[in-house]
Amino acid sequence: MALETIEDQPRVVELLRRALAADRVAHAYAFIGPAGSGRTTTALAFAQALCGMARSGSHPDIHLIAPTPPESNPKGPKAIRIGAIRELERQASLRPALAQHKVFILDDADRMTGEAPQAFLKTLEEPPARTVLILVLERPRAVPATVLSRCQIVRFAPRRDQRATTERDEALDILADVRAKGVEALFRRAGTFDRDRERAERVVDAYWWLCRDLVLAKCGAAHLTGDADASVREAEGWSWDDLWRGLQTCREAREALAVNVTPRLTLEVLLSRLALRVN
């Protein structure tokens, strides 16, 4: 695994490659983005690049911490608990075994519970030399701001997959319907997502990609979008402020779905801002 194999996040890969080339690697990163966007894969590739000898997928200086059930209840809810953070602290205090760095990846870091976030904050405040900490998370609001403020934030875009064209078509159809028929259509179309969170997530991602493509079109780079002519036509009806608000709204909608806000309510807010331009 290498950073060069990460194809869907070119901005992230370039940022990390520059940090490596300049030997200006931060002591802590927060990789934030939706599930399936390649956050953990990228974290492992970055760790391997730092340690230099991990092409096989394992290395004594790369540590992956993931949520686990309580010892007393193997079927209980998975979380990163204080014990895992204490073990991280112990391992971080040791010298690297083979490489110049020790890397700790906290997968689903937004599932730290109890005293774990506060204990981890102490490690962030006084990081051992040559230690790099990478938090992988979807819900930044589930992590104390004091923790995130000590990390370099790296945001991951939703990943396009084979269903992207179908979802984009559905997203555009809903947008046109709500624009034409107003609030009645908004509530009717949002209501179809009431019990389908995964579909809602895919359509929110489609709206993010739409806004991204419209930004490219307004910058004169429509050829980088999936449909250059359609992107140019659609972009004519959007101001720069509309697009920046649209991207922010999509990100907020993704975070809302991640913390169990109902899909219907999430889509109502999203469509009111994108289709009706309600602030």
Image (cartoon, rainbow, N blue to C red):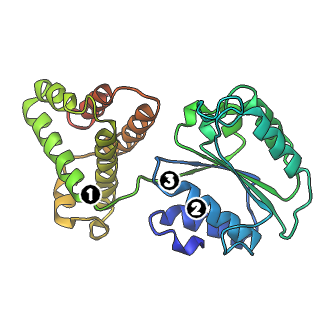
Rendering coords of residue 93 (x, y %): 91, 50
Q: Quadrant of residue 198?
A: top left
Query: Height in image: 25 above or below 116?
Result: below
Residue 194 circle label = none
Which residue occupies the foreground of this view, 33 or 243?
A: 33
> In the image, what residue type sits under mark 2?
Thr
The residue pinned by badge 1 equals 163
Which residue occupies the foreground of this view, 82 or 244?
A: 82
The residue pinned by badge 2 equals 42
Circle 3/circle 2 CB separation < 8 Å: yes
- Helix, strand or loop at mark 2: helix
Separation of residues labelled 3 and 2 (CA atoms): 10 Å
> In the image, what residue type sits under mark 3?
Phe
Rendering coords of residue 38 (x, y %): 50, 58
The residue pinned by badge 3 equals 156
Query: Does residue 82 appear left or right of residue 140 in this picture?
Result: right
> In the image, what residue type sits under mark 1?
Arg
Q: In which quarter of the image is residue 131?
A: bottom right
Rendering coords of residue 265 (x, y %): 30, 25
Separation of residues labelled 2 and 1 (CA atoms): 23 Å
Q: Is residue 206 visible?
A: yes
